[in-house]
């Protein structure tokens, strides 16, 4: 991508230097040397072939001078040639007597020099134009290179900027999500206190009742046992609530591991089953064996499944005329993903907008927080999956979460 | 205690099965007869046993069911003023004030101390017993009162106002003998052992105007 700047300018600088040398006064040596040389060689040729027209070399000298040293030296070479020819080679020899008989020579030399000058001028103009064109081209290339480089740098800067913005955005989103969760927790402190208070109240009352049963004569041990069982159940519920709140406000990067979604569902069902039993919810599970493993955060996925189950169970709280049946399935999807579906026979959407179900703070329940399903959605999307809900026939809703399998 | 417990009923209404069961368990452990309901509508759909009773009610009910306070208002409107002990998960002062203004016996915070709850229950049941007694007395006085003739009623209220036979005769424009006869018959029909007894009955009848029982006698 990068172009060498110094390398591009090098040849034109060299040419400029050569031109500067040629334009110095030293170039006037060229006609002197050329005419001198022509004189010497012609003299020698005359010794060898006295009858030959040997003065043609002066034309060469004039041409060389005019060509290489340009106009001034060219005219100097004309003058020197006339003098030399007249002095050395035209009779009377060794006498400088410029006369009419020299005129043809003079005209020939002048014509030759003029023609050569003219040609040289043209050549130089052409050269200059060429150099200029070359320079212009080079400049344009440089400019464009520069532009390209700048554009490139801008692009790099923009890319870095965008990466920063995206990171900031992600950070903000995380913060926002956490803030939303914490705000919700803040808003729901009273209802959490209520939730914790419920089992606590049950624990206290049952414990006091147990004491009363024990103080009887004889102690009513069956009732004591029943009271203690009530205490245990309420204690378990309180701890479940705490776990739920903790996972709600838990911060820290998700811990991605390879896991089996069936295990997650089993885990959640193991703890949820007791609670569902007391609410007369029958759970059916159809977990497809040998599902592909997926990469995910175990706690988040547990929360996802647990939210779905709770949601389904709560939707059936007002159902008395039919069995409260909850079906949880896992299966392989056509695209080698994994689908978890949870069906209930509850009140269904009850006219609610199914697309709003997954928005935060939207609830069809009077005391619902509107967070359960929206948390499910963010968990599903975080794992690269999606969540959807359709009506179950004839009652209730089917919520389906599709998750991608882990890349092997 | 057991003599007070005999023939009474604690009614627990809470949508939370654990809380409901634990409260019922606690009541049973001190030999208080108890019935538990998951909602106010479930409670209303049952026949109420004829015994002094009180309600132990969560102030808040989730979902579409009316809140405890609404239910309290509803009961008063139905002329069924069962004493209510509210249990709340929050220290909600306005709610507590409202409940007490509407005649609640007690407003307790969850988790409830056994002693506080049982004291409140006993107090509420005693109150209900007293109210039922009052109601029963009124009903019998009222039925006796209904058997009086118009003139006997008039004379009974004038007597209760402290008028002498002579004054009554003058007021009604009848003879003193007639007043004496009617007064004696009123005393007999009302089964009043003494004048003071008759006056108390008259007061009871007058006091029940507020309950919408027309026992009026205009002078």
Image (spheres, rainbow, N blue to C red):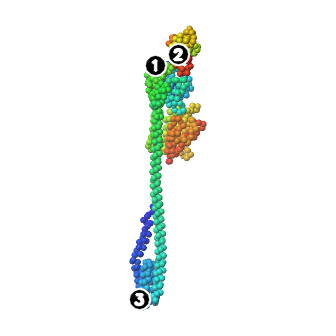
Marks 2 and 3, Cα distance to the nearest angstrom? 178 Å
**Quarter holding the C terminus of chain B?**
top right
Marks 1 and 2, the one that precedes in the sequence: 1
Counting from the top left corner in percent of width and height, residue A280 is at 54, 32
Up the image or down, A220 lies above or below A31; here it is above
Tell me the CA gap for discs 1 and 2: 35 Å
Kind of element beneath mark 3: loop
For the image shown, how many numbered marks are present on the structure?
3
Check whether the beta carbons of the residues at disc 2 and disc 3 lie within 8 A of each other: no
Q: Is disc 1 in contact with disc 2, using a CB cutoff of under 8 Å?
A: no
Chain for mark 1? B
Residue on which the image places disc 1: B1
Residue A154's x, y, as percent? 46, 57
Give SS at disc 1.
loop
Label 2 residue SS: helix
Of residues B64 and B165, the one nearer the viewer is B165
Q: Write down the quadrant of residue A46 in the picture.
A: bottom left
> Which residue lies at the image location 45% right of the left edge and 30% below the top edge?
B93
Label 2, on which residue? B202
Say whether mark 2 and mark 1 are on the same chain.
yes
Which is closer to the viewer, label 2 or label 3? Answer: 2
**In the image, which disc is placed on residue B44?**
none
Mark-to-mark CA distance, 3 and 1: 167 Å
Q: Residue furthest top?
A: B177
Image mark 2: chain:
B
User: Is B17 above or below relative to A218?
Assistant: below
Residue furthest toward the right?
A394
**Residue sitting at x 53%, y 36%:** A365
- Across and down, in percent, residue A135 comes to 46, 68
Q: Is residue B34 above or below residue A17?
A: above
Q: Which residue is mark 3?
A: A96
**Are the numbered discs 2 and 3 placed on the same chain, yes or no?**
no
């Amino acid at each position: 991508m990068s172009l060498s700047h110094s390398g591009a300018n090098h040849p034109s600088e060299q040419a400029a230097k050569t031109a500067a040398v040629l334009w110095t006064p030293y170039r006037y040596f060229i006609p002197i040397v050329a005419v001198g040389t022509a004189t010497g060689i012609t003299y020698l040729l005359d010794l060898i072939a006295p009858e030959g027209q040997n003065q043609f070399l002066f034309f060469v000298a004039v041409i060389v001078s005019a060509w290489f040293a340009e106009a001034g030296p060219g005219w100097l070479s004309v003058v020197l040639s006339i003098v030399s020819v007249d002095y050395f080679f035209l009779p009377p020899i060794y006498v400088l007597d410029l006369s009419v008989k020299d005129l043809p020579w003079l005209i020939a030399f002048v014509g030759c020099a003029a023609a050569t000058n003219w040609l040289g001028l043209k050549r130089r103009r052409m050269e200059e134009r060429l150099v200029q064109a070359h320079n212009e081209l080079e400049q344009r290339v440089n400019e464009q290179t520069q532009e390209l480089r700048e554009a490139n740098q801008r692009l790099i800067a923009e890319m870095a900027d965008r990466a920063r913005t995206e990171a900031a955005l992600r950070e903000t989103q995380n913060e926002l999500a956490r803030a939303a969760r914490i705000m919700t927790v803040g808003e729901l402190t009273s209802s959490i206190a209520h939730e914790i208070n419920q089992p606590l109240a049950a624990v206290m009352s049952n414990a006091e009742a147990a004491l009363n049963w024990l103080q009887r004569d004889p102690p009513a041990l069956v009732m004591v046992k029943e009271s203690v069982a009530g205490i245990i159940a309420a204690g378990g519920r309180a701890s479940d609530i705490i776990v739920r709140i903790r996972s709600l406000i838990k911060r820290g990067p998700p811990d991605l591991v390879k896991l089996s979604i069936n295990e997650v569902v089993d885990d959640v069902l193991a703890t949820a089953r007791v609670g569902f039993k007391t609410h007369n919810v029958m759970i059916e599970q159809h977990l497809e064996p040998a599902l592909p493993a997926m990469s995910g955060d175990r706690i988040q996925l547990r929360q996802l499944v647990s939210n779905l189950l709770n949601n389904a169970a709560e939707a059936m709280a007002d159902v008395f005329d039919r069995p409260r049946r909850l079906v949880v399935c896992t299966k392989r999807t056509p695209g080698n993903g994994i689908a978890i579906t949870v069906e209930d026979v509850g009140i269904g959407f009850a006219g609610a907008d199914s697309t709003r179900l997954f928005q935060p703070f939207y609830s069809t329940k009077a005391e619902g927080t509107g967070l359960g399903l929206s948390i499910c959605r963010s968990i599903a999307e975080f794992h690269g999956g999606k969540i959807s809900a359709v009506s179950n026939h004839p009652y209730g809703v089917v919520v389906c979460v599709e998750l991608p399998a882990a890349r092997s | 205690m057991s003599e007070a417990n005999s023939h009474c009923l604690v009614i627990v209404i809470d949508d939370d099965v654990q809380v409901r069961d634990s409260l019922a368990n606690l009541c049973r452990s001190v030999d208080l007869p108890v019935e538990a309901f998951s909602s106010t509508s479930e409670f209303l759909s049952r026949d109420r046993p004829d015994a002094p009773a009180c309600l132990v009610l969560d102030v808040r009910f989730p979902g579409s069911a009316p809140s405890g306070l609404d239910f309290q208002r509803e009961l008063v409107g139905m002329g069924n003023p069962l004493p209510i002990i509210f249990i709340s998960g929050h220290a909600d002062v306005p709610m507590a004030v409202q409940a007490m203004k509407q005649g609640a016996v007690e407003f307790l915070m969850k988790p409830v101390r056994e002693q506080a709850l049982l004291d409140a229950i006993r107090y509420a049941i005693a109150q209900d017993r007293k109210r039922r007694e009052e109601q029963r007395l009124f009903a019998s006085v009222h039925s006796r009162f209904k058997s009086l003739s118009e003139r006997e009623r008039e004379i009974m209220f004038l007597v209760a106002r402290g008028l002498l036979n002579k004054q009554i005769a003058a007021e009604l424009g009848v003879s003193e003998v007639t007043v004496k006869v009617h007064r004696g018959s009123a005393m007999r029909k009302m089964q009043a052992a003494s004048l003071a007894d008759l006056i108390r009955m008259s007061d009871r009848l007058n006091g029940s105007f507020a309950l919408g029982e027309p026992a009026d006698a205009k002078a």
